[in-house]
Amino acid sequence: LDVVDMYSAIRPEDDEEPDRQEVIDTPDGKPNAEWLVFRKHTKFTEPLEKTKEWTDLFEPSFEEVPLFQGRVRDYKRRRAEAVGVVKCRIKVFRKENETKAGKSELNPERDPEYFEVVSSDPSIPDALEKCRPYKQYNIYETFPEATVEIRVYCLKAFQVTPGGFMREENGEGMWLQYLEARIGDKRQESDVVKSLNPNFFHVFQFADCIIPGPSQLVITLYDASIAPQGMILSTKKIGTTTVDLEDRWFCQEWRDEKYKPREVRDLINEDDLPGVSQGKLSLFLDIVDETKAAEQPVEDIKVLGKTLPMELRLIIWNTLDTAPKDSYTSDVYISCELLGVGQPKMTDTHYGVKVKAYGMFNYRLKWKCKFPEMGLEYLMRISVWDENALTSHKSIAEGVLPLKKLFKDCFERNQGKTSPDDMEFVFLTPRDMGQDTDADKQVLVDEENFKYPFIWYKMVHPNFGFNREKNSQAKLQLSVQVMPRAKGRANPAGRARNGPSKLAEPNRPPQPANPILESEKCKAYIIYSIKEFFGRCKGTCMCICCCVICGLILAAIAAIQMSFPGLLPIPG
């Protein structure tokens, strides 16, 4: 048996009746993924044979007589002592009164006859008046034999009483539970799920079953002790429920239901606490004629581990308060890595970013992945770097942005939707980051005026401390957008600033450029650099200029005095 973790994950499914007004029977009254998958199956909160809608329809097809070995030792636990069941049909026939001569009182010329008595007859004379004469019933005409495939859809167990082996993991109770289903000598098991209230979403299929025949479907919940190799070493029974398959098969109303109703059945351990529920099991079952099994495929409800293709789009807008690495500026670029999904992706470089100036990017990065996916934690590692042409690049700041909640939200919103028009984008909002800011007031747009809520993400460096408020080395303005892959294909967006959904060019100062291929840009950069240089050295330059001017004046005076002695009076 495979041991799997439990995911709140289910499969995409066509919305066959999108306009139908339905009762949403979820705890919060809102449609969720499970409701979207199973909403066609009417839900009952007790065994189907106990509901007012079905109890009269499920009139027992046969009388059931339990078999015991010897005397019943404990009447309260008699179900646990039963070794089998005899199923039969019992008919009562009344012999009409006869004369001393052995003839019928009603007609002395004939022998007395037997007449059928049914429960609806007020009295024996009334039964005789109906003249239902005795006849040997052919049980195969009333209950024709059929070869069927039995499909048991076990959804989840809940309200399970803590028991079993009572292990601990990280200081908390831990259970490894699985289901076993038996019909006659046929037996199947589900995967083991690590949970006290496990979601199984498992289908048991029993082919080549004969009805009438072994008809007791016995489902048992076990807690297992498992070896490191995955083998089950020992088990403890939690509880059992039994379903009579013949009552279902010979109920025409039940067979006519296209989507069989869901029911909740009690799991009872007759060995320990007879009659006391140890938990509940949600399930529905179907019985299909073997000749039609291929035309009616098994409904795929094993939602454990199902994934939805997703696309992640990350837009880096700006940086601010970037710690300088080259005197008072940095040549900044951003590296982003969705851990476990390919290599890091990087923006272009904004050269000469000052501490209090914006590092401008308007740069889109994209990833494709699935949710949920084993081993993927959906963590985005973001690093701000200072680029150096001759030496190694310097790390300015870094951070890890958790996105699993965002992916899960997108997954749940888009289950059961097949049309991209119905699917939704999901954004990381300021409130997701604990910021008390309305997302509608904090948005940027692309050239098609599509709005992107953004957040400011403070980043630190290990060498300067981990307090984001006191030790921040850079602030990053970004937008995070998650969507189903189908939605992404219907609303494409280019990488970097490319279209479709093109992003505006950042309003950067002139940047370094190739003097041969981009001479104008190079000229603008040189002029900008000179202006920046003199802007930074304005005070120093004025002092130098003053000194030079004073020197020139003194030199001129000295030259005049030497050329025209006595022209300029010399003091003293």
Image: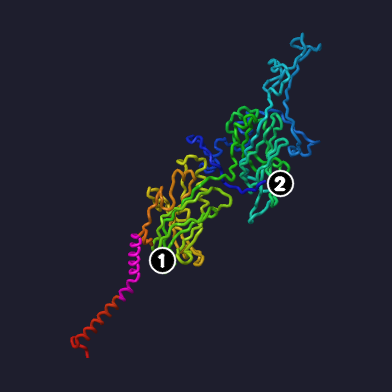
Q: Quadrant of the C terminus?
A: bottom left
Query: Do the residues bearing badges 2 and 1 touch, measured as CB atoms within 8 Å?
Result: no
The correct choice, above or below, for 566 with respect to 487 in the image is below
Q: Which residue is mark 1?
A: 329
Comparing 456 with 374, the one in front is: 374
Labels 2 and 1: the sequence-earlier one: 2
Q: Is residue 527 left or right of residue 498?
A: left
Q: Position of residue 188 (x, y in %)?
A: 68, 40
The correct choice, above or below, for 401 with respect to 1 in the image is below
Quick check: can you spot residue 56? no
Image-quadrant location for residue 454: bottom left
Kindly state the secondary structure of the residue where label 1 is placed. strand
493 inside magenta stretch: no
Under mark 2, the amino acid is Lys
Q: Which residue is mark 2?
A: 236
Comparing 203 with 555, the one in front is: 555
Comparing 356 with 353, the one in front is: 353
Image-quadrant location for residue 218: top right
The correct choice, above or below, for 58 with respect to 190 in the image is above
Quick check: can you spot residue 219? yes
Q: What residue occupies the far bottom of the structure in this picture? A: 572
Q: Position of residue 285 (x, y in %)?
A: 63, 35
Residue range of the region highlighted in magenta in the rendering = 519-544
Comparing 357 with 86, the one in front is: 357
| Marks 2/1: CA–CA distance | 68 Å
Q: Is residue 552 left or right of residue 36?
A: left
Image-quadrant location for residue 68: top right
Kindly report the secondary structure that dominates the magenta region of the rendered protein: helix
